[in-house]
Image (tube, rainbow, N blue to C red):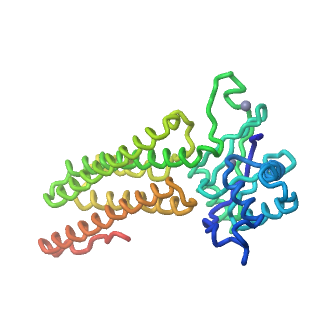
Amino acid sequence: MAKSAMSQSMDRPLPDISSLRPPGGKRSSKRDRILEIFLRQEGHLSADDLCELVRREDAGIGRATVYRTLQWMVGAGIARKVDFGEGHSRFEPSFRHPRHFHLICTKCHRSSEFLSSDVEALMEEIAAARNFATTQAVVQIYGTCEDCRTGTKTDTIDGTTTELVFARDALRIAIATERSGLEFYTRAAGLTKDARGRTVFQRLAAEEREHLGTLEKRYGELVAKNPQLEAKPTFLFFKGAASGLFAEGAAKLREGVDDQQALLIGIKCERGSHKFFKRYGERFEDSEGKRIFLEFADEERAHLDLLIREYRGLVERQDRRSPAHAAVAKPRR
Ligand SMILES: [Zn+2]
Ligand SMILES: [Zn+2]
């Protein structure tokens, strides 16, 4: 099957396939058969590819039925329509397949999938600034792949492994964030003069260390189960987003801050991290990568709540000691 370019639908909710059966439809209805065959495929199918596959299994299903079913699947959010500039559309299952963009080689016609939170954020920003309601955003990069240019055998991400590579990258990102969080809290604990504040930072550092261990174990298990996974190219590109948050916070700590400011910096980092992982994670269709993001968002939320409680406690203790200090900034939730 030829591989090529694509388009991508944004933010379509995950369909419950069993509920999408036509009313009164029997289990063996033609539509169910076609759906079942389609969902077994990976990569990017043309309508003709699907007709051929279907007819290999059931010669009684006509071309028109396949075409109609494909249109229905696109409408129901089960399939994504992709245009590789070949003069006809291709279709890929959207179920358990994270949305993505494509690099397309015009020599060998292979396509390779990737996603970037930065590119998505920028597109959203532009659409919002122009008051534009986006239904679909397409990013296609055409050119020559490394294979074709240098003869070096390189791997692509073509739909067969996208979900696994997505999970791998989600774990890598969570691990990197956890690591910088650990560094941040270790440094904060060293700087804090207030004994109670120090204990809080130490506790958070210990939690980050524990979470880090859990995530690394999970990463190790994923890679052990799929030995080819480590060598796969990067799928998720995160430049700004959450990874830089704690590093920025740690740099601020170096400027010499008091206990209260240290807590506020921690609150800002955790809030930013929680929001990013939650918002970004929620937009994916059900997958391991989505679960990793949302679980991580929950952990960051718990840290945020703890820091806010501590901040309030600290302010109260200071107020009791010197009422003149009573007017201090309250952290936002
Ligand atoms: Zn190529
Ligand atoms: Zn694709």
Name which residue lies at 69% across and 58% down: 36
Which quadrant holds residue 199?
Answer: bottom left
Is residue 83 in sight in this rendering? no
Q: How many marks?
A: 0
Residue 325 lies, with reference to residue 111, above or below; the image says: below
Residue visible at 33% across and 58% down in the picture: 265
Residue drawn at x 26%, y 74% is 327
| Ligand 1: image quarter | top right
Camera-side residue of 103 and 291: 291
Q: Is residue 86 left or right of residue 129?
A: right
Q: Nearer the viewer, residue 91 or 284?
A: 91
The residue that appears at 32% across and 58% down in the rendered structure is 266
Residue 22, horizontal then vertical, whole percent: 73, 73
Residue 3 visible, this angle: yes
Furthest-bottom residue in view? 24
Image coordinates of residue 240 in percent, x first then y, are 50, 49
Quadrant containing the C terminus in the rendered view: bottom left
Instruction: Give left or right: position of 24 versus 287.
Output: right
Q: Quadrant of the N terminus?
A: top right
* Most foreground residue, 249 or 215: 215
Residue 58 screen position, x and y as percent = 80, 55
Q: Percent x, y for residue 227?
A: 49, 35
Residue closest to the eye, 314 or 322:
314
